[in-house]
Image (tube, rainbow, N blue to C red):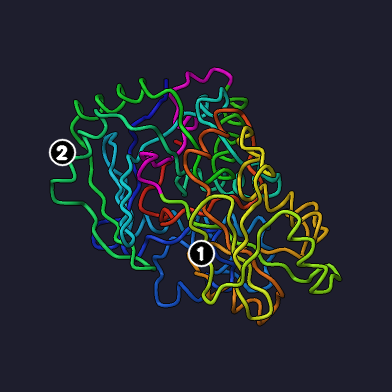
Amino acid sequence: MSVIRSFKALRPAKEYAAQVAALPYDVMNSEEARIKVQGNPYSFLHIDKAEIDLPENTYLYSDEVYKKAADNLKKLENDGICVQDSKNQLYIYRQVMGNNCQTGIVGCASIDDYMNGVIKRHELTRADKEEDRIRHVDTCDANTGPIFLAYRRNSTVDGIIEKYTALLPEYDFVSEGDVKNTVWVIDDEKDIEAVITAFEDIESLYIADGHHRAASAVRVGQRRREEKPDYTGNEEFNFFLAVFFRADELKILDYNRLLADTNSHSDEELFALLEESFTINESPVAVSPERKHTFGMYYKNKWYSLALKNGIADDTDPVASLDVSVLQKEVIEPVFGISDPRTDSRIDFVGGIRGLGELEKRCNEDAVLAFSMYPTSLDELMAIADAGEIMPPKSTWFEPKLLSGLFIHKLK
């Protein structure tokens, strides 16, 4: 049984939606954010990355950064750029990028569902990143970035989505990367109740993206429960902002690897070590793997296709059978000597949205070798989450990214 709850969204007035909406805080650094907001005082980056409105040498995690975020959010509301809805509602958020269309229900998820495992995770979180978002949520007194949740298809939810997406939208604009963003408001109480009831039949929800934001929102809720021991469970801090998407509509892109050196191996040694696990063929074109257990490798201005030899992968184990696991076990650690890809500076990761040309470019700048990957599938992600297992770092790259600023969930 899953919980979805309607809420009174603080959101942009229709004419400001495109200016307010911004990419998530964690897909760019401060310098990039400063550039993006030039000429746009309403960008949500002024809240999500408030250091851009402070001197450049400001410590990212100083009290003044979080206070500035809260002040900027309050200013958007005071100036009428963002307005809070007068009654609890649900919303529909559709994103179209190329041939991919994903349509989700915007509402609030339960911190109890997170704590009791109804909301399933597949990544570890870092304490420092959690603490940053805890302070951001706590100081702003709001969830400012939605959690990207996936659910298995439900016909009732499908029907409600079809009903509203046939109507005129509340927002409709194109954002960076040529992504079409469209929003509808579910304001009929019977339809809201139908969605809530339908989610009671959905056994599990899966975090696709936003593990740190989810963990942080839950910690804030737990802290406020401690501060208010007579809480009823209906207070807004018991819930966090999320977009619930049908799993079969989501697209995971490849998450490719870059290596800074060959670990002192000569060319002959490198290829001999790789040939212990792979069949290798030179390719006249860039290699974008078309099936599981195949990889591309770019080295010294040449592309190679690598096919894993039979019997090497343990396909009975949902984690070990992942291509990111295979590459780590058979190549990254034994050949390149990188046992912890989370912390080793000799490895870097490039989302597939940047294309294979980015791998070639980086190999001419600050890396020597690249591996292109076949994307992890949603079925693999859910199988691992169902098993209570954890994926290796940098296993999934979702596109398009959910924009921040279109919906804010106040905790009071």
Above or below: residue 16 compared with residue 237:
below
Residue 38, how many percent across, how many down? 45, 77
33 vs 91, left or right, is right
**Disc assigned to residue 288:** 1
The verdict on residue 271 being magenta is: no
First to last magenta residue range: 229-250
Q: Position of residue 169 (x, y in %)?
A: 19, 51
- Residue occupying image coordinates x 66% and y 38%: 314
Which residue occupies the foreground of this view, 49 or 326?
A: 326
Marks 1 and 2: CB-CB under 8 Å?
no
Q: Quadrant of residue 2?
A: top left
SS of the residue under disc 2: helix
Q: Residue shown at 51%/48% (left/top)?
A: 140
Q: Amino acid at mark 1?
A: Ser
Q: Position of residue 82 (x, y in %)?
A: 33, 54
Of the two numbered discs 1 and 2 on the same chain, state the one appearing first in sequence: 2
User: Which residue is label 2 attached to?
Assistant: 163
Image quadrant for the N terminus?
A: top left
